[in-house]
Image (spheres, rainbow, N blue to C red):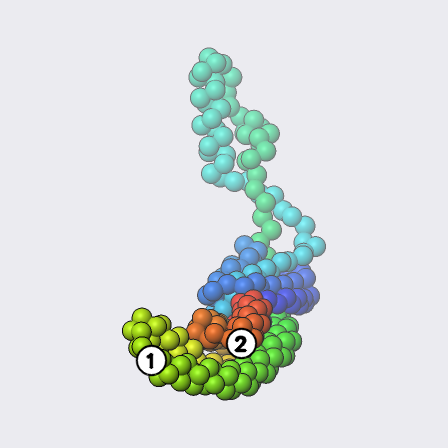
C-alpha cells in the first residue's frame, strides 16, 4: 500500500551548475503529471515524464528541476528586435516630421535590442547525470509514499478489526433477539388461537407483527463479513489498491445500513452506527491511497 502524498529532493553538481530535483504529490482520482524544467533541459521532459508514469499510477505529481549556474550571463544583439525598433523609429520620424537619419547608435540605446544568452551546451554525460539524479529523487519519493502507506495500512486495518468485533457482537445480540422474538411469537400465536370470536382485523395485525419481527439480517451479515475479508486481502496486495478499497467501504456501508433498517433491536442499531462511523473514517484514509 502506498500513499498518494509524498515529497523528495535530490541534487548534483555538473559542468553546467548545480541541478536540484524536487518532487511532490497530492491526492487525485487519476494520474496527473506536470514538470518544470529550465529551457536548456526541455529536451529531457518526455523521458522524465515516462519514467514517472512507470513508477506511479495515481496522484497529482509536480516535478521541478532547477539549475544554479555561476556562468556569466551574456548579452547579444537581437536581429528581429533591431528590425522592429528601426521600423518603430521610422514611424515616429514620419509622424513627427523629423529630418534626422536613424543611426545604429539610436538602436543600440534601446534596451530590447539585446537578449540574454545563457543557454549552456548539455553534454551527453551531463544529461545522463541529470537523469540519474531524477531517478534517485523518484526512488526517494516512492519510499516516502511507502512509509506513509504503511502507517495508513496499520491504522485502517485496526479500524477494520474493530468493525469485525462489532459484527461479532451483532451476531451475538441477534441470537439473543431471536430467542426473545420466538417467545413473543409463540405468545401471539397462542393468543390468536385462544380467541373465541376470531377477529379478522386482529389476526391480520398480529400476523403482520410476527412477520416484521422475524425479518432476517443473516444475508447482510454474511456479505458484510465477506467484504471485511476481501478488504483485508486487498489492503495487503502490491500495486494500486485505493479504488478497490474505496468500493469495498461503500459496499460495507450499504450492508450496515440495511442491517440497521431491517433489524428491530435497538442494541443492534446502535452497533451498526458504530460500524458506519468507523467506515467513514476509513474512507477518509482510503482517499489517500494510490
Mark nearer the N terminus (1 vs 2) = 1
- Rendered location of residue 76, percent (x, y): 57, 43
Secondary structure of residue under mark 1 = loop
Q: Measuring 57% from the left and 64% from the top, which residue is drawn there? A: 25
* Of 36 and 106, the residue lying toward us: 36
Mark drawn on residue 255: none
* Of 201 and 57, the residue lying toward us: 201
* Of 192 and 80, the residue lying toward us: 192
Q: Does residue 19 appear left or right of residue 99 in this picture?
A: right
Badge 2 local density, few (<14 within 10 Å), some, or many (20+)?
many
Residue 81 shows in this picture? yes
State if disc 2 and disc 1 touch (CB < 8 Å).
no
Badge 1 local density, few (<14 within 10 Å), some, or many (20+)?
few
Q: Measuring 43% from the left and 74% from the top, which residue is drawn there? A: 262
Mark drawn on residue 268: 2
Q: Does residue 13 appear left or right of residue 254 in this picture?
A: right
Is residue 123 depicted above or below 184 in this figure?
above
Mark drawn on residue 196: 1
Amino acid at each position: 500500500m502506498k500513499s498518494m502524498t509524498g515529497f523528495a529532493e535530490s541534487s548534483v553538481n555538473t559542468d553546467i551548475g548545480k541541478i536540484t530535483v524536487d518532487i511532490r504529490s497530492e491526492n487525485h482520482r487519476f494520474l496527473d503529471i506536470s514538470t518544470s524544467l529550465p529551457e536548456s533541459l526541455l529536451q529531457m521532459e518526455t523521458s522524465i515524464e515516462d519514467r514517472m508514469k512507470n513508477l506511479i499510477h495515481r496522484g497529482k505529481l509536480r516535478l521541478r528541476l532547477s539549475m544554479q549556474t555561476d556562468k556569466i550571463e551574456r548579452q547579444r544583439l537581437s536581429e528581429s528586435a533591431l528590425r522592429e525598433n528601426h521600423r518603430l523609429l521610422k514611424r515616429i520620424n514620419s509622424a513627427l516630421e523629423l529630418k534626422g537619419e536613424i543611426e545604429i547608435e539610436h538602436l543600440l540605446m534601446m534596451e530590447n535590442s539585446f537578449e540574454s544568452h545563457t543557454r549552456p551546451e548539455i553534454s551527453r554525460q551531463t544529461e545522463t547525470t541529470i537523469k540519474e539524479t531524477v531517478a534517485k529523487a523518484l526512488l526517494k519519493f516512492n519510499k516516502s509514499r511507502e512509509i506513509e502507506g504503511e502507517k495508513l495500512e496499520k491504522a485502517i486495518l485496526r479500524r477494520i478489526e474493530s468493525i469485525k468485533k462489532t459484527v461479532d457482537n451483532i451476531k451475538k445480540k441477534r441470537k439473543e433477539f431471536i430467542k426473545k422474538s420466538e417467545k413473543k411469537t409463540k405468545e401471539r400465536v397462542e393468543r390468536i388461537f385462544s380467541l373465541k370470536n376470531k377477529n379478522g382485523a386482529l389476526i391480520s395485525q398480529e400476523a403482520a407483527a410476527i412477520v416484521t419481527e422475524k425479518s432476517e439480517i443473516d444475508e447482510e451479515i454474511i456479505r458484510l463479513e465477506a467484504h471485511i475479508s476481501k478488504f483485508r486481502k486487498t489492503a495487503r496486495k502490491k500495486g494500486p489498491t485505493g479504488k478497490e478499497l474505496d468500493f469495498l467501504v461503500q459496499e460495507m456501508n450499504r450492508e450496515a445500513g440495511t442491517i440497521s433498517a431491517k433489524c428491530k433491536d435497538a442494541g443492534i442499531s446502535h452497533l451498526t452506527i458504530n460500524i458506519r462511523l468507523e467506515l467513514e473514517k476509513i474512507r477518509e484514509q482510503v482517499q489517500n491511497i494510490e
